Image (spheres, rainbow, N blue to C red):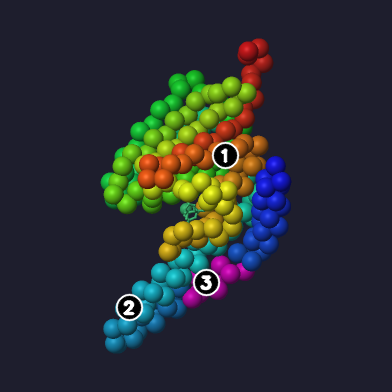
Amino acid sequence: MEEQLRKSDTLNVIGELAAGIAHEIRNPMTALKGFIQLLEDSIEEDHSMYFNVITTELSRIDSIINEFLILAKPQAVKFVQKDIAQIMKETVELLSAQAVLHNVQFRIYYEKELPLVFCEPNQMKKVFINIIKNAIEVMPKGGYITVSLQACGDNKVKVSIRDEGSGIPGHKIKKLGEPFYTTKERGTGLGLMVTYKIIEEHKGTIEVESKLGKGTVFHIYLPYIKKAGEQ
Ligand code: ADP
Ligand code: MG
């Protein structure tokens, strides 16, 4: 409980700072990218190695800023009653090219009459993207990502995303969602932080189960509103 509170305080403070800073950084970044491109085109000698590094690092800054902007105070956030299986299908479609490149295949199971969830569809998509991207990245040799969506007790819809990757050591699981916690050379350590924040805003919860060498499952529980007359 204390751990939960501490995390959410940090998230709020960072969220407020993030919006302003991210916006301020964006414009000079765009100018930098443009001029570096011009510079590369106008220099005779081949410095492509330097330019590649500059471009890669600039895109890294870009992705950090993008993650931060999501933490910003809601811009035109619109909550609606939505079939999240539909959102999941769109997400999987979106990531299918990346999955093919990594030899990853999807298996999706969902109940036909899944209760609608009151949610912000774009943010929910972001949650699924972040978790599925991590799943793809953790299976360098390919494998299956198994997604299931079902109604469970307590008026909640449960979304589970399972991979066959390296797994996460038990003592590291509590670090997931902490700002800048990453084990990847080119990671930002912000994807799960954004994910946890969005789920928290939807009054949902996340549970992580993992076995080293076997894989990891992220379970997301989202409350739904029962229709009048429903048991
Ligand atoms: P990033 O992907 O940029 O590293 P994330 O916040 O998305 O940042 O993830 C943080 C860290 O959590 C990852 O670097 C990785 O160590 C761990 N992680 C997340 N998802 C998985 C997974 N499916 N399997 C193993 N480790 C994971
Ligand atoms: Mg990630």
Picture quadrant where residue 69 is located: bottom right
> Does residue 122 appear in this view?
no
x 56%, y 44%: residue: 123
Q: For residue 206, which numbered disc appears in the image? A: 1
According to the image, label 2 marks what residue? 49
Q: Quadrant of the C terminus?
A: top right
Question: Residue 164 location in percent, x, y?
Answer: 36, 42
Measuring from the top left, give residue 76's x and y in whole percent: 63, 47
Q: Which residue is mark 3?
A: 29
- The region drawn magenta spans 24-32
Q: Which residue is nearer to you in this view: 10 or 119?
A: 10
Of the two numbered discs 1 and 2 on the same chain, state the one appearing first in sequence: 2
Residue 16 on image: x %, y %: 69, 58
Disc 3: CA contacts within 10 A as few (<14), some (14-19) or many (>=20)? some
Q: Nearer the viewer, residue 128 or 215?
A: 215
Instruction: Decide: is 53 above or below 106.
Output: below
Q: Quadrant of the N terminus?
A: top right
Residue visible at 47% across and 45% down in the picture: 131
Magenta stretch, main secondary structure class: helix
Residue 212: x and y in percent read 41, 45
